[in-house]
């Protein structure tokens, strides 16, 4: 089995389980049921990568399927949806997964509440899962550390983005990538799966190192797609990153290496709300002409390469080595 087949099979399994996780805890009040079903509907349409990685983390250690790990994997997709709900509110993003963001459908206040519900629902599902108590305690510790890291990364990201006079530093952007993306998108899910399978500390350290490096590569590629991607494939606006004054290697490198004219244009238009298609094209051209796009692609390959170096330390099973290598390839080559 290759990674794409593994991802597809995981997604199918998760999609079957997810509805039951919501139905189990829906209150009897009809109005609340109607509101909460918005959270359930927003888990649909994703790629289910993070839940799939929990399943993979477990199988790396046990080399077998487990229906209980699929419940945990499915719960993590609720967490992912909740983080996206809050992220869209902060960024004022109007599109998510090819449709209106939840806050545009139910309003900002209800969307915040639904996002909060998802955080605690994920904790509750894992706490009640059928694993040994000491394993669940360790897994929940990693889960909550992952959520905290995500919030820390988001706070640093917002603090820099909202002050246009703040100098952008590459080391800070890479720290944001590590905290905000690598932790909850790659290393966190793999670690939770491996912990519930009984992995030892050395194995967990190797998985974490793999996940941190691949997660940074994942976010760099995400930032490239956020400006250069196809909107119908990406599922969100390809001008929103620019309009949000997002911290990326693209803007950092362009501001370092651009001509005076290019830098002035970026300082004037990067972070402009409702940027025109002409200005969007010009910013893309600046990113290309200054070498910012090539530099970002090179950095993504560097961190992906670092991740790949850890695969042999994680497993000597050829099947799983293949899946992990293809996960690295998927991260670098994805278009959505």
Image: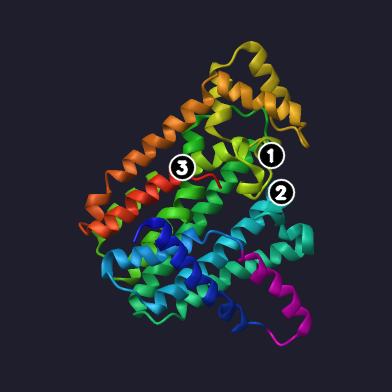
Q: Which numbered marker is on residue 244?
A: 1
Residue 31 in the figure: left or right of residue 61: right
Quadrant position of residue 165: top right
Which comes before the other along the chain, label 2 or label 3?
A: 2
**Residue 47 vertical placement versus 58 (above, below):** above
Q: Is residue 176 magenta?
A: no
Residue that numbered label 2 is attached to? 93
- The tag on residue 333 is 3
Camera-nearest residue between 237 and 212: 237
Rate crowding at label 2 as few (under 14), some (14 to 19) or many (20 or more) other CA atoms within 10 Å: many
**CB atoms of marks 1 and 2 within 8 Å:** yes
CA–CA distance in space, label 1 to label 3: 25 Å
Q: Magenta stretch: give its range.
A: 27-44
Residue 295 is situated, as x and y percent measured from the top left of the image, at 47, 26
Q: Residue at x 64, y 52 (%)?
A: 87
Q: CA distance from mark 2 to mark 3?
A: 25 Å
Quick one: quadrant of the N terminus? bottom left
């Amino acid at each position: 089995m290759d990674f794409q087949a593994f991802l597809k099979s995981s997604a199918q399994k998760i999609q079957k389980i997810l509805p039951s996780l919501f139905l189990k805890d829906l209150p009897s009040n009809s109005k609340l049921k109607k509101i909460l079903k918005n959270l359930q509907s927003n888990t649909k349409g994703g790629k289910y990568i993070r839940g799939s990685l929990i399943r993979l983390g477990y199988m790396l250690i046990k080399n077998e399927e487990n229906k209980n790990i699929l419940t945990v994997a499915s719960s993590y997709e609720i967490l992912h949806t909740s983080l996206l709900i809050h992220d869209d509110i902060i960024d004022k993003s109007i599109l998510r997964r090819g449709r209106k963001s939840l806050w545009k459908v139910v309003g900002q206040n209800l969307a915040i509440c639904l996002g909060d519900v998802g955080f605690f629902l994920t904790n509750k599902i894992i706490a009640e899962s059928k694993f040994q108590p000491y394993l669940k305690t360790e897994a929940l510790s990693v889960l909550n550390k992952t959520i905290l890291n995500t919030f820390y990364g988001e706070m640093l990201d917002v603090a820099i983005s909202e002050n246009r006079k703040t100098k952008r530093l590459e080391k800070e952007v890479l720290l944001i990538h590590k905290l905000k993306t690598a932790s909850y998108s790659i290393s966190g899910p793999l670690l939770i799966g491996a912990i519930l399978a009984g992995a030892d500390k050395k194995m967990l350290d190797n998985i974490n190192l793999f996940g941190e490096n691949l997660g940074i590569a994942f976010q760099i590629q995400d930032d490239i797609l956020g400006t250069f991607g196809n909107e119908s494939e990406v599922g969100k606006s390809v001008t929103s990153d620019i309009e949000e004054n997002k911290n990326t290697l693209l803007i950092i490198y362009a501001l370092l290496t651009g001509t005076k004219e290019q830098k002035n244009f970026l300082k004037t238009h990067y972070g402009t709300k409702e940027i025109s298609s002409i200005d969007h094209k010009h910013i893309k051209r600046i990113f290309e002409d200054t070498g910012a796009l090539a530099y970002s692609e090179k950095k993504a390959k560097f961190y992906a390469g670092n991740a790949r170096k850890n695969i042999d330390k994680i497993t000597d099973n050829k099947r799983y080595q293949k899946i992990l290598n293809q996960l690295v390839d998927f991260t670098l080559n994805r278009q959505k």
